[in-house]
């Protein structure tokens, strides 16, 4: 298997930086990202949606209903996702030869969204060109049809899974009723690929209008493209037959004769210049523009034919463009004229000019126009094209809906879940610190019970349900078994990572209990009826270490006895959260958290023994108080954890990253030993250390 060496190096740097950041947040007492919205803390904020429950994967009728989905996965995914792999051993095992095990794996990993089937990972992965067996759009639609058939026939066990539960609520309060048209796009780019030279059209509308990245257009972590403003830096579609999808559906007599283009951008601080800088366009060349949108200082200009300079041929608005901040732009056009909406508000109007200049040979371009001497400077996070004119309310709804992804981040905050009806005491709730962990998941930390009056009872087995479904994996609070005595009591000091579905202002979160205040609900975890075996990945494949491999690797590198009781106890607590596949693509937030905790435990044990850390750092008193002493520490970490070579990050790159971390930790007034332990954890838990190749 041929692996791009630069890609491996990028993986190393990406996850090293990420673990440094997470570690800094953890040590400083913060767990969330930057947020613009705060919840008012109201108990029982139910938005009125009905929870539809979860599918029990052990029921025979559900297994039978799942067979059409299983037939597709077994036929087309088994080379990587079965018990007998032939390419790379990837998790989960949704293509296992046993239908029941396949359903269990599919359920445990949340591969099917029973509330919104079109958001199911089995469908979305095919839209993103992940191992299609023929035409990706057709394959995705075939999978979606089977998923819908399965959901329609399956039996939902909402009463069993949510029998003892708190009042449901969203994590970000909102009173908006979204009338958005986000799912109506005929071309859609979320730019989530992260590598390669192709940005895929994920609209599902054939033919797929993919874009080729040219002249070092770079990916943005978490989704997006970055343009530095240089000549010919552009993302460009092919010519016919792909690009004529726009012409046929919009500009012909049989077409809609109307269109809208929606985008999220973040202009650089120095993005202003004296020339119009194109965000997107539909054209043959710079001289033959059919349609386009550009930005210049405080003006956003929409172009509908020929040259920008043509009198009466441009719709523009004079708005205050906040540089380095996300901006939402929608331009619409139909026989009533043209409009520009900025952040959901109407910002400009223009005349109707017809489609005489449109050509079926034109191409869609992002970041610049063919033949231009410069490109847009900044990030383009999202772009969607519609074959209709979006109205005012829809433009506002699209902005509000997508703002949760591009602007509103769930800042670390206490969220209250009302349990008054469960405990029989008014004004009783469980408060949990919740934040965004990353773009795909939430972090829940330290649930604490608050009672309206003192009482004595047991709480056992707390789980988190999202939109009526209890995710099986990573339910760390399921181990809670606590006797309550008083009015306030912390139930757990750990955190758990739960997968997002629709975002913090839409996902409905419920706390579910096995036992609370004398009431009991038997929760039976689905179990495989046979053991899934895994093959070892070949040394030429990129992978991550399995269960015990990570443990013994850290033990060897730090010269700590693997039978150390502290480490064995920690390992036993974490091993179900550690990787069960060597496939690097199975790396998720839960695995990274477990590897981080395991590394932190070993680094703590290292610093507890003077002989150990003197041997490891080759100095009597390791220190980070000055550059010379830091170099000794950094060299030791590099030599023990990083193998070097052309696929690895360099000592200079590691030094730069660790200097940033040490500076941040010094601002927290931490001791020398704490900072060294933190740098040890950051390197040991980074992909630069554990990614196999």
Image (spheres, rainbow, N blue to C red):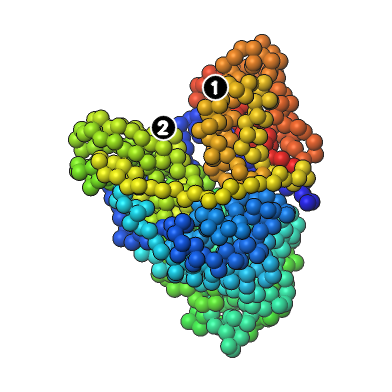
Taking 73 as reference, is 26 above or below it?
above
Whichever of labels 2 and 1 marks the residue nearer the N terminus, that label is: 2
Q: Which mark is residue 565?
A: 1
Q: Residues within 10 Å of mark 2 (few under 14, many from 20)?
A: few
Residue at 67% across, 36% down = 690
Percent across and percent down for residue 72 are: 61, 66
Q: Which residue is mark 2?
A: 493
Quadrant of the image occupied by residue 468 = bottom left
Residue at 63% across, 34% down = 548
Q: Is residue 476 left or right of residue 530?
A: left
Q: Is residue 345 left or right of residue 579?
A: left
Taking 452 as reference, is 237 above or below it?
below
Quadrant of the image occupied by residue 413 = top left
Distance from the alpha carbon under mark 2 to that under mark 1: 21 Å
User: Which of these two is toward me, 423 or 671?
Assistant: 423
**Does residue 29 show up?**
yes
Work out which residue is located at the far top of the displayed protein and give it. Answer: 620
């Amino acid at each position: 298997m041929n692996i791009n060496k630069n890609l491996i190096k990028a993986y190393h740097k990406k996850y090293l930086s990420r673990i440094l950041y997470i570690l800094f947040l953890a040590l400083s007492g913060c767990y969330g990202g930057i947020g613009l919205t705060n919840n008012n803390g109201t108990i029982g904020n139910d938005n009125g949606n009905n929870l539809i429950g979860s599918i029990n994967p052990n029921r025979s009728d559900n297994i039978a209903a799942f067979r059409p989905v299983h037939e597709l996965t077994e036929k087309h995914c088994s080379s990587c996702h079965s018990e007998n792999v032939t390419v790379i051993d990837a998790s989960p095992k949704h293509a296992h030869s046993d239908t029941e095990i396949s359903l269990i794996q599919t359920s445990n990993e949340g591969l099917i969204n029973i509330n919104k089937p079109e958001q199911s990972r089995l469908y979305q992965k095919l839209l993103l060109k992940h191992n299609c067996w023929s035409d990706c759009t057709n394959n995705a639609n075939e999978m979606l049809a089977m998923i819908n058939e399965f959901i329609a026939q399956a039996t939902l066990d909402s009463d069993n899974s949510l029998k003892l539960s708190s009042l449901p609520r969203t994590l970000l309060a909102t009173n908006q009723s979204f009338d958005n048209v986000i799912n109506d796009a005929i071309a859609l780019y979320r730019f989530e690929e992260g590598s390669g030279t192709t940005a895929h059209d994920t609209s599902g509308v054939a033919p797929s209008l993919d874009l080729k990245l040219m002249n070092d257009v770079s990916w943005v972590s978490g989704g997006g493209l970055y343009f530095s403003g240089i000549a010919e830096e552009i993302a460009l579609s092919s010519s016919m037959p792909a690009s004529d999808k726009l012409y046929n559906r919009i500009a012909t007599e049989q077409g809609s004769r109307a269109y809208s283009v929606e985008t999220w951008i973040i202009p650089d601080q120095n993005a202003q210049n004296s020339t119009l800088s194109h965000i997107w366009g539909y054209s043959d060349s710079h001289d033959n523009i059919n349609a386009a949108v550009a930005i210049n200082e405080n003006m956003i200009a929409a172009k509908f034919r020929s040259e920008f300079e043509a009198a009466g041929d441009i719709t523009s608005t004079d708005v205050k463009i906040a540089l380095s901040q996300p901006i939402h732009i929608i331009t619409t056009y139909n026989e009533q004229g043209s409009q520009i909406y900025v952040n959901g508000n109407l910002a400009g109007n223009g005349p109707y000019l017809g489609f005489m200049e449109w050509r079926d040979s034109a191409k869609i371009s992002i970041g610049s126009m063919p033949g231009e001497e410069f490109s847009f400077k900044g990030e383009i996070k999202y772009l969607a094209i519609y074959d209709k004119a979006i109205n005012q309310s829809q433009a506002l709804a699209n902005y509000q809906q997508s703002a949760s992804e591009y602007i509103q981040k769930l800042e670390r905050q206490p969220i209250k879940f009302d349990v008054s009806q469960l405990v029989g005491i008014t004004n009783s709730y469980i408060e949990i610190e919740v934040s965004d962990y990353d773009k795909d998941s939430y972090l829940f930390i330290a649930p604490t019970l608050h009672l309206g009056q003192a009482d004595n009872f047991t709480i056992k087995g707390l789980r988190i349900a999202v939109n009526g479904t209890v995710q099986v994996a990573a339910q760390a609070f399921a181990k809670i078994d606590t006797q309550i005595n008083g009015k306030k009591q912390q139930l757990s000091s750990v955190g758990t990572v739960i997968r997002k579905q629709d975002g913090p202002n839409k996902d409905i979160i419920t706390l579910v209990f096995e036992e609370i205040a004398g009431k009991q609900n038997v929760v039976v975890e689905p179990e495989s009826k046979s053991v899934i075996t895994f093959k070892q990945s070949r040394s030429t494949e990129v992978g991550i270490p399995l269960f015990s491999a990570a443990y013994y690797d850290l033990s060897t590198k730090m010269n700590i006895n693997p039978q150390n009781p502290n480490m064995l106890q920690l390992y036993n607590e974490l091993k179900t959260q550690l990787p069960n596949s060597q496939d690097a693509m199975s790396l998720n937030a839960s695995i990274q958290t477990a590897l981080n905790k395991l590394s932190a435990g070993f680094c703590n044990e290292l610093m507890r023994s003077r002989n150990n850390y003197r041997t490891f750092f080759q100095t009597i008193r390791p220190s980070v108080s000055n550059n010379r002493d830091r170099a000794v520490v950094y060299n030791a970490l590099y030599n023990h954890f990083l193998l070097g070579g052309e696929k690895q990050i360099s000592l200079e790159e590691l030094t730069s990253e660790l200097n940033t971390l040490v500076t941040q930790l010094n601002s927290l007034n931490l001791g020398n030993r704490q900072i060294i332990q933190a740098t040890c954890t950051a390197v040991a838990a980074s992909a630069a250390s554990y990614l196999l190749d």
